[in-house]
Image: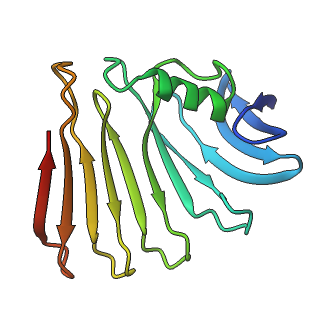
């Protein structure tokens, strides 16, 4: 077992269970209270479950992956990974892939955000808990590094079908 101090919360640390020199489980603590946990397998994406409000229900799911082409790795992404897991605990190739939130515990996500290559992002909201996204925001990837920001807002009907899409460039 290895304990690493982190900057994610005040007085936070991660207790890693290690097998053959690789972390296989992580428990995240603020003081003596566990607020998150993750199981991991070397070289594979993994999921971290987080209790963001301290009610002992792990409503937030964070998915992490590794990107060897560097197109997902921004300075902001590196800082986030270091704050959560401890400085340089994981490879600089690790990044946050997505976040899903189910605040009321009914197993229907009210929020989802996916991070795509070249600083792209897709964000979805289900405001009425019917299991269909009501609206979305997309920041399109800038693969050509042109500096042009292309954004899109999408609104859906009650069946999840797109009814309006507004694009800004």
The quarter holding residue 50 reads bottom right
Left or right for 155, reference 71: left
Name the residue located 78 percent from the left edge and 53 percent from the top edge.
34
The quarter holding residue 16 reads top right
Name the residue located 57 percent from the left edge and 39 percent from the top edge.
40
Where 97 falls versus 35 (above or below)? above
Q: Position of residue 72 (x, y in %)?
A: 35, 27
Left or right for 44, reference 34: left
Q: Nearer the viewer, residue 37 or 18?
A: 37
Where 16 falls versus 151 (above or below)? above
Where 118 falls versus 162 (above or below)? above
Left or right for 139, reference 76: left
Name the residue located 65 percent from the left edge and 22 percent from the top edge.
89
Left or right for 87, reference 48: right
The quarter holding residue 41 reads top right
Q: Position of residue 59 (x, y in %)?
A: 58, 64
Where 4 falls versus 159 (above or below)? above
Q: Position of residue 55 (x, y in %)?
A: 73, 69
Name the residue located 35 percent from the left edge and 71 percent from the top edge.
126
Q: Please state, as top left, top right, bottom left or bottom right, where the N terminus lies in the image.
A: top right
């Amino acid at each position: 077992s290895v304990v690493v101090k982190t900057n994610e919360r005040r007085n936070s640390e991660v207790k890693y269970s290690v097998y053959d020199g690789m972390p296989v489980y992580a428990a995240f603590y603020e003081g003596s209270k566990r607020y998150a946990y993750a199981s991991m397998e070397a070289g594979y994406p993994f999921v971290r479950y987080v209790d963001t409000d301290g009610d002992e229900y792990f409503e937030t799911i964070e998915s992490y992956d590794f990107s060897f082409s560097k197109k997902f790795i921004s300075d902001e992404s590196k800082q986030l990974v270091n704050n959560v897991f401890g400085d340089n605990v994981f490879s600089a190739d690790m990044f946050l892939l997505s976040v899903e939130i189910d605040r009321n515990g009914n197993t229907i996500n009210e929020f989802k955000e996916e991070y795509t290559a070249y600083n792209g992002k897709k964000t979805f909201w289900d405001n009425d808990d019917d299991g269909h996204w009501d609206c979305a925001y997309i920041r399109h990837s800038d693969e050509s590094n042109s500096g042009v920001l292309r954004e899109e807002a999408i609104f859906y009907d009650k069946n999840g079908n797109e009814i309006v899409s507004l694009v800004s460039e």
